[in-house]
Amino acid sequence: MELTPIITHIVNLSLTRGRPPNLWKRAIITPVPKVSNPKELADFRPISVTLLISRIVERILVNKFVLPALPVNLLADQFA
């Protein structure tokens, strides 16, 4: 648990400044084929892999602040 104070400081600093660290905004994009024999760019689906800490903080913020602020009927037909 040596990293807990450091991670807490980075997350709190990000929240008070209102913007995440630049590294959290980067992603490794891997093209995954949609079809068995891709021939053009449209035959690929981009999969973005971001840092785990950025995904965790984003999920917490969405669940705690964004979703409670939205009317339930706006989310009724959303899947995925």
Image (spheres, rainbow, N blue to C red):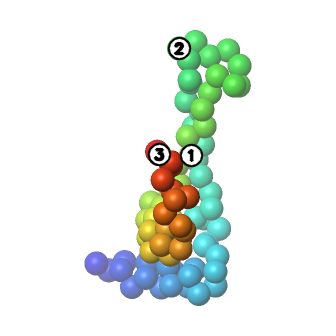
Instruction: For mark 1, give the secondary structure.
Output: strand
Q: Position of residue 66 (x, y in %)?
A: 53, 70
CB of mark 1 within 8 Å of CB of mark 2? no
Q: How many marks?
A: 3
State the residue lying farthest toward the front: 73
Q: Which mark is residue 2?
A: none
Give the left or right position of residue 42, taking residue 37 as reference.
right
* Local secondary structure at mark 3: loop
Image point (60%, 73%), residue name: 20
Give the residue displayed 49% in from the left and 68% down from the top: 67
> Label 1 is placed on what type of residue?
Ser
Nearer the N terminus, badge 1 or badge 2?
A: 2
> Can you tell which of label 2 and label 3 is closer to the viewer?
3
Q: Earlier in the sequence, mark 3 or mark 1?
A: 1
Instruction: Look at label 2 and name its amino acid.
Output: Ser
Residue that badge 2 annotates: 36
Lower position in the chain sequence, tag 2 or tag 3: 2
- Quarter of the rendering containing residue 60: bottom left
Residue occupied by mark 3: 79
